Amino acid sequence: MRRGRRGPAARTLATGVVLALAGALAACGGGEDDGEGGEGGGAESITVWIQEDLPDRVAATQEIIDQFSSESGVEVELVSVGEDQFNQLITSAAAAGDLPDVIGGISLPQVRTLSANELLDTESVGEVMESLDPSTFSERAIELTADGDTQLAVPSESWLQLLFYRKDLFEEAGLEAPTTYESILAAAEALHKEGMAGFVGANAPGDAFTEQTFEHVALGNGCELVDEEGEVLLDSPECVEAFEFYGTLVEDYSVPGAQDVDTTRASYFAGQAAMLIWSTFVLDEMAGLRNDAKPNCPECKDDPAFLAKNTGVTTTIQGPSSEEPAIFGEVTSWTIMTDASADSSKQVVEYMLNDGYVDWIAIAPEGKVPVRTGTPDNPTEFSDEWGTLPAGVDTKAPLSDFYPADILEILAQGPTDVSRWAIPQGQGDLLGATQGEHPVATAVNEVTTGTPAEEAAGKAAEAVRSIADTMP
């Protein structure tokens, strides 16, 4: 999830991060100090990439890593990598033989991309899981990060994609909560007027956030990327219907032009949108706890938490072609790369899921819901601790100060209910392979700017089929 914070899609690297990465790529290749590589045990120095590119988060992670190094004697070079740069950088590092030892905070599609390219040390990953005890993890998180009986990554935390809506405006207009295609369109039409968009959602091409947003909408209508036999389904009636719904929603009841993670949030925060699809990472910002992303609606001047108090949350969306609603979310993980310094790499991953775990999820508890709930001796230790952690950056406060208990329960239960394209069908590698070309985001952009849904869906399906044909 995200830009502006971490969760939904793309963001550029700061100049300092780029320079740090340039130096790190030259220094990668675990086990240089002992020369033992993937076969070796304890290298004295390893390289860890994380997909956290906000300075405060990088600094907080560095503190955890420094504590690990102090306790273990293993030196760690921490490298911050932006989500939008990940595929390019990992390709360059692999070609140069300069892969990092460990990567943290990576998404499910990225795990599949690494797996498809045989860049993972799944044996070491499996040993970490056994050491930590799989029974202490969410079963759903394990399913999503495994390929059959092979564990590809160690699941760490999750975030959810949600539909946020102005419950004060809904109540005034006598509208029901937006939980179905029908009720969402009805509300968008009723509330869309001068200075107020009925809905804002991503439609920028080439943007992972656009794909995440549409997948959330599409899953609720029974639209799948692919089936168990590998047949691409983006041009199925269910998917065409999903494209048509989202196209109408954005074209008729939203703001003009390309919308992304930053512009959609800005519109809602300015009080200029009645509904927004975004990730759980927005919750602390909506409460006015982060200075560089504060609500600025007219009412927010007197009460920075006005939007938090007057926002409702819809977790699942249901379309007319589905018998049940669905919820989209992401599970982010830690994994160990091929040719890594195995023992030291396993040590750091175990630390991040054990002694350093609470400090790691405390970096952004609104979007880092633990999928390891506790330890064998204390099965709810981490989930209990998560519920007490303060959110925010410039101002710290528990989310419970702003949001009712039912919303917090939704966050906590998210890892057990999350749905995703392709992975449940055993086609996770195809999901990973589509990430570089963004065919779904292209189709979403087209359908929200006038292209008929059937045409856009057909082009997206053909693009995915072409990608599938190039896979081994």
Image: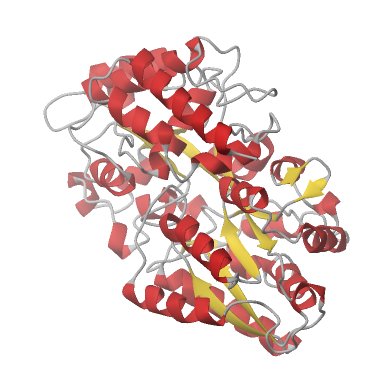
Q: Is residue 58 left or right of residue 468?
A: left
Q: Position of residue 163 (x, y in %)?
A: 42, 33
- The image position of residue 50, as x and y in percent, is 54, 66
Q: How is the image coloured?
A: secondary structure
Residue 269: x and y in percent read 27, 46
- Quadrant in the rendering for residue 77: bottom right
Image position of 66 (left or right of 7): right
Where does the C terminus fall, quadrant-wise? top right
Name the residue at 58% across, 65% down: 94
* Residue with the most extreme left position: 194
Residue 200 x, y percent position in the rendering: 29, 33
Q: Residue at x 85, y 50 (%)?
A: 135
The residue shown at (66%, 61%) is 334
Asked if residue 87 shows in the view, the reply is yes
- 121, 62: nearer the viewer: 121
Q: Is residue 90 left or right of residue 446?
A: right
